[in-house]
Image (cartoon, rainbow, N blue to C red):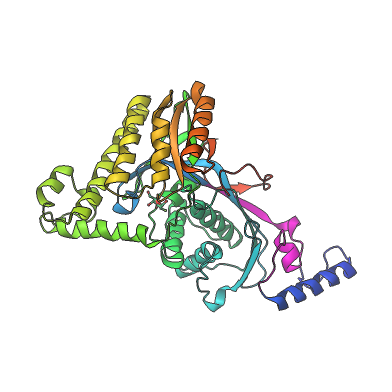
Amino acid sequence: MDPGKCPTGCDRIYATRRLVKIIFATLGNSFDKKTRYETVFGEDLSTRERTFRAPGRVNLIGEHTDYNDGFVMPAAINFSTFVSISQPFDSKLDIFSENFKDSVSVDLTAGPRPRGDWSDYVVGVAVILQAAGYTVRGAKLNIRGEVPIGSGLSSSAAIEVATACALVAISDIKIDRVELAKLCRRAENEFVGARVGIMDQFVSLYGQAKKALLLDCRSLDYELLPLSQEAHLVVCNTMVKHELASSEYNQRREQCEAGVKHLAQALPHITALRDVTLEQLEAYGKDLADVIYRRCRHVITENDRVLKAGDALKRHDLGEFGWLMYESHRSLRDDYEVSCPELDIMVELASRVEGVYGARMTGGGFGGCTVNVVANEHVEEFKRAIAAVYEQKTKLKPEIFVCETADGAGEVTSVPAIQQQAGD
Ligand code: GAF
């Protein structure tokens, strides 16, 4: 279709839209309080757009192990990001975020640079696809995210993966899901500047409803394990926002690398903490600084817990699974030091409620959510008890919701109405 012609012959309306488009283009990026990109960029593309959805995740166990080549066990959840994309028309990406009521326009041929805001997750994916040798066509993208931001439920992977699915579809790129997960992680590592592992992008692409995904982050072999029907996953948002891209996360990675470097003097075959046993740490880690020793101990013991948790799920042993969750939290709090007082309070309160098998912080830490495994018949009581006492102790009103698991990313026919969120 000729982009200068009105498809329905309504020339006056179309001319007006073109004028609006020119005015907005002149105003640059200050398009506050618009609702969708067609009102911003002046062209109604609703009849020829396609929509892609990618879910956030809750991590059941296996925290800060993915970037140590270790094991994780997340599940995809029914909070997603939706990217609606138009047919390609030139080398520009015109992006509108419904959440931020903000628009960004970049020329893909001009080597876009990070802006330090939400758009980096979108532009970064396009830039990295190009860097990997794929030809990305220009497009208009409308983005709506339901995953609460900064809550440890991986809104970042959801936006990256939904964007990647949309861009490869309209650019006719043939690529498998493993490669897509790796490129999305690379976008976050190299463009956004957070040195995250592969867990979130992988589960956003490979998750399945009613299943936990046990992933070996080195080989990327995975198993989908059925979740018990006797209990629900309940997520409690402390309402303390984490700063994942903050120096703390990257510092933990450096500390793990320092541990590997030291241990490799005695164990030359190791390339990651995944290769080290607790006995080896005890034998060869005596000269490590205490803080590095504890970081290593968390990763080594957490890997072991994930594998045990996988076995427990297979045996339908929720008691053992829950105990491993508490142990994981303790290790994240004391050895890895990525918890915060609010997360600790939330876990402590949960441990006292009848019918709770286990509870722990989920995600990168420093705020965000806990995940709780609660017997079906005790869920309502759990929600009531936690909400009241947590608010009393912290003066923060928590968001508590029963978490439905979901399938991984794919194309959808429409964007659902905004659902209740677990945060902002
Ligand atoms: C964040 C990161 F994105 C993941 O890769 C993972 O490291 C997690 O923190 C901690 O387990 O979600």
Quarter of the figure with residue 221: top left
Does residue 25 sit above or below 358 in this rendering? below
Is residue 50 part of the magenta span, yes or no? yes
Q: Who's the residue at 32% across and 60% down the image?
A: 251
Q: Who's the residue at 45% across and 67% down the image?
A: 191
| Residue 207, image x, y percentages | 48, 42
Q: Who's the residue at 45% across and 53% down the image?
A: 242
Does residue 420 sit above or below 188 in this rendering? above
**With 363 as the anchor, is 126 left or right in this view?**
right
Quarter of the figure with residue 12: bottom right
| Residue 281, image x, y percentages | 15, 48
- The N terminus lies in which quarter of the figure? bottom right
Quarter of the figure with residue 46: bottom right
| Residue 104, image x, y percentages | 62, 69
Residue lying farthest top? 377
Q: Nearer the viewer, residue 212 or 169?
A: 212
**With 120 as the anchor, is 294 left or right in this view?**
left
Residue 140 showing in the rendered view = no
Is residue 43 part of the magenta span, yes or no? yes
Q: How many marks?
A: 0
| Residue 245, image x, y percentages | 42, 60
Q: Nearer the viewer, residue 154 or 45?
A: 154
Q: Who's the residue at 72% across and 58% down the image?
A: 35
Range covered by the magenta-colored residues: 29-55
Q: Nearer the viewer, residue 260 or 412?
A: 260
Residue 225 showing in the rendered view = yes
**With 161 as the anchor, is 340 left or right in this view?**
left
